[in-house]
């Protein structure tokens, strides 16, 4: 979890229009975070530690925490040289990293300074004193998006369409993939209230995973609740990559390439029976066993929590899942 200052001191260097008084507005429009590389390599180590999906809180002097973001996948750090819209001095190296920003939940400067001292480096790992506020913000964002999933999907599509982190082809694919994901999750939860493998029942810890992959679905299959399972994130990874599947009677099926030590480490019983599936689920499972199980399949650009809503809500679910393991 990261906290980054928009460095208004550097931003205000030089003359700016009266309506250009927020560095973060440039960040939001660009779908990225920016840093001025004042000293050679000063941020290289921190940038190397940041991973795709990491939550980032953007703080702006005089405004407070103005957004929650998620480092985009693939993680791509680029460098350009000023003068730019973010820094007017020629020759100043500007580092940028694509971030999916969500501005629905914020905190004022006063609220932030009541719980933590933000002095020091522009980019830092969030202090322990800030974590309770961070989790409260993520929970609030989670609740907002949970109650309005369609609005969240529209916002996600808009962010994807405007983000320079993706090629034109990727934007089209990701935009199409986002549409309806909230409804799909709701439809799956109505049928599958727990992870059949781990028994976990808390929905916020679970991924709504397509049985027949979204990319090959036709018609109503994309949103059909029978075409989904609620799975713990690590089980979803095995299922989505074809390392495990299920017989109609609930028997766990393993791909020959699955390392038994993985099952052992994740406390998954190779001989488990997870309960019989309904007939409308069985046709999707038949496809999964025939065309996904045991087939080399790289997980493409994919929401880190499966088909849950994107943005800060996804970050909250991801952190919650990690804390529960």
Image: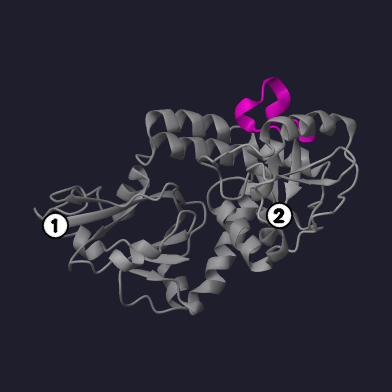
Magenta stretch: includes residue 218 = yes
Along the horizontal axis of the image, is 153 left or right of 182?
A: left
Earlier sequence position, callout 2 versus callout 1: 1
Residue positioned most to the left: 90
Circles 2 and 1: CB atoms closer than 8 Å: no
Q: Write the residue at 64% across / 41% down.
A: 149
What stretch of residues is rendered in magenta? 212-226
Question: Would you identify the image quadrant in which residue 170 lies?
Answer: top left
Measuring from the top left, give residue 268's x and y in whole percent.
76, 59
Tell me what residue is drawn at x 63 percent, y 43 percent: 241
User: Where in the figure is residue 290, as x and y percent of width and height?
Assistant: 73, 30
For label 2, the SS is loop
Question: What residue did someone put label 1 on?
Answer: 92
Instruction: Tell me: residue 158, above or below residue 144.
Output: above
Q: Mark number for residue 232? A: 2
Query: Could you tell me which secondary element the residue under label 1 belongs to?
Result: loop
Quadrant of the rendering where the C terminus is positioned: bottom right
* Residue 242 visible in this rendered orientation of the protein: yes
Is 110 magenta? The answer is: no
* Residue 74 percent coordinates (x, y): 42, 47
Q: CA distance from mark 2 to mark 1?
A: 45 Å
Report the predominant secondary structure element of the magenta stretch. helix
Is residue 317 rendered to the left or right of residue 75?
right
For residue 163, which quarter of the picture?
A: top left
- Judge left or right: residue 95 versus residue 295: left
Which residue is at the front of the view, 278 or 20?
278
């Amino acid at each position: 979890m990261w906290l980054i200052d928009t460095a208004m001191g550097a931003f205000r260097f030089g003359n700016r229009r009266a309506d250009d008084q927020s560095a973060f507005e440039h960040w939001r429009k660009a779908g990225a975070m920016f840093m001025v590389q004042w000293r050679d390599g000063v941020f290289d180590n921190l940038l190397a530690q940041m991973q795709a999906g990491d939550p980032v809180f953007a703080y702006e002097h005089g405004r407070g925490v103005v957004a929650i973001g998620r480092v985009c996948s693939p993680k791509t750090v680029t460098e350009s040289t000023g003068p730019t819209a973010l820094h007017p001095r020629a020759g100043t190296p500007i580092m940028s990293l694509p971030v999916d920003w969500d501005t629905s939940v914020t905190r004022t400067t006063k609220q932030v300074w009541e719980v933590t001292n933000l002095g020091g480096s522009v980019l830092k790992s969030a202090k322990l004193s800030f974590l309770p506020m961070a989790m409260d913000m993520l929970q609030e964002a989670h609740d907002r998006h949970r109650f309005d999933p369609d609005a969240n999907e529209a916002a996600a599509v808009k962010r994807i369409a405007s983000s320079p982190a993706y090629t034109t082809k990727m934007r089209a694919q990701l935009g199409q993939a986002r549409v309806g994901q909230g409804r799909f999750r709701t439809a799956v939860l109505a049928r599958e209230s727990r992870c059949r493998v781990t028994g976990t029942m808390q929905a916020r810890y679970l991924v709504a995973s397509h049985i027949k992959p979204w990319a090959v679905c036709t018609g109503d299959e994309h949103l059909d609740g029978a075409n989904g399972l609620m799975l713990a994130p690590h089980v979803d990874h095995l299922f989505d990559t074809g390392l495990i599947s299920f017989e109609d009677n609930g028997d766990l099926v393993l791909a020959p390439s699955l390392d038994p030590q993985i099952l052992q480490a994740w406390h998954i019983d190779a001989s488990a029976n997870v309960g019989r599936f309904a007939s409308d689920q069985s046709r999707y499972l038949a496809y999964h066993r025939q065309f996904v199980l045991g087939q080399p399949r790289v997980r493409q650009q994919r929401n880190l929590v499966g088909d849950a809503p994107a943005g800060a809500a996804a970050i909250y679910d991801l952190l919650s899942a990690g804390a529960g393991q």
